[in-house]
Amino acid sequence: MKGAPAPNISPGLSTAQRLDWLRLIRSENVGPQTFRDLINHFGSAGTALEALPDLSARGGKQRIKICPLPEAEAELEAHERIGARLVALGERDYPPHLRHADGPPPLLSVLGGEVLRHPKTVAIVGARNASLSGRKLSAQISRDLGQAGFAVVSGLARGIDAAAHEAALAGGTVAAFAGGIDVLYPPEHDRLLADIVKMDGNAISEMPLGWKPRGRDFPRRNRLISGMALGVVIIEAAKGSGSLHTARFALEQNRDIFAIPGSPLDPRSEGANSLIRQGATLVRSADDVLESLAGRIEPELPFDRSFDAPETDPVPGPSEPTDTAREAIVSALGPAPVELDELIRFSGEPARIVHVILLELELAGRLERHRGQKVSLLY
């Protein structure tokens, strides 16, 4: 992919729409799933922004912080100054497999070329304190995948990640950030990042520019890594490591999970060996990965709905919940996560009404979303 033409974003959001999307996702208590629900209910980000104060108030929070227009304009300008761009879900430069993951980020900060929209992508992650053999395996698999026409995505961390990125430069590689794409971590990888961008690769993040990564931001980053890929290769992952978090996300996203076996005496291999026992595909080389993925590689995935439009037609019937419906949903919720479908069946309310009530509670900071379409009430 070296020598590819300069990035050329296809027509998508207008500048005004992009600013509305940015303001909505940067507003208080609005995450990717809430963003999607708001768009589906109100039809556009602009209309959703106008509705946020009333929704939040009905959920029990009288004042909600909405991202001001000048702040969103400043963020767009800051991207332009560093040669980056904000790519919206559905635009040509948005990673094709990520758009079909659960709760994909509506906007991604992107630096670099066009590798991120390559549909043949494999993730490689592993230990930061990797052994020499682990680094060599990471580099060899990454290099061979590149020669077979695959891009490699990883987290730009020390050890396995860095080895994978370095070896994938010629074939194309994407580094996912836990913080803003202008906040390099670890800082000594500045030259590696420069090489990635120089070779038409990418740095991506769903966080604002200037955002310094916290511990809880790395699982969000790991979800991007697995969501972009057809499969995830785990090399030297200790028990409880971030690489195993990536594997769990991959499982939830219906991605293939590959693991390199290691010595049972090496704690860095405990996680990968455990994954193999649980059913992950044991691989020794890139050939094993390619064989497993053969015949299952999709072309670039379509995005078949218009920008800023709801995914489904409005459901006939009352569009706003009654106080009785709100009381029923709140009383049915508790600190233990429950499945959304179960909540809808139990309440007897139309799904559209239940979604609106959950939006009200979430915008008020009273609802927590969990994996597997589960929700719980915060006290």
Image (tube, rainbow, N blue to C red):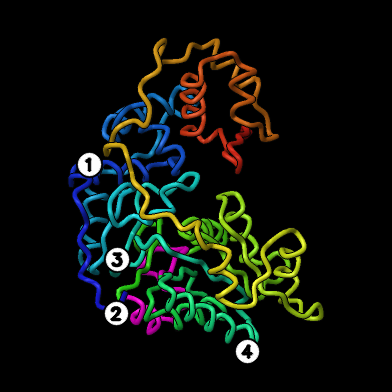
Is residue 202 placed above or below 11 in the rendered structure?
A: below
Taking the spot 59% from the left edge, 29% from the top edge, the residue there is: 340
Location of residue 152 by image quarter = bottom left
Q: Which mark is drawn over residue 132?
A: 4
Q: Residue furthest right?
A: 265
- Nearer-N-terminus badge (4/2): 4
Label 2 vs label 1, nearer the camera: 2
Q: Marks 2 and 3, how far apart in space?
A: 12 Å
Q: Mark 1 points at which residue?
A: 17
On residue 198, the disc is 2
- Seen from the viewer's position, the closer of residues 185 and 9 is 9
Distance from label 3 to label 4 (Cα)? 31 Å
From the viewer's perspective, tell me whether residue 309 is left or right of residue 186.
left
Residue 192 is one of the magenta-drawn residues: yes
* SS at badge 3: loop
* Residue 273 picture location, percent across and down: 74, 70
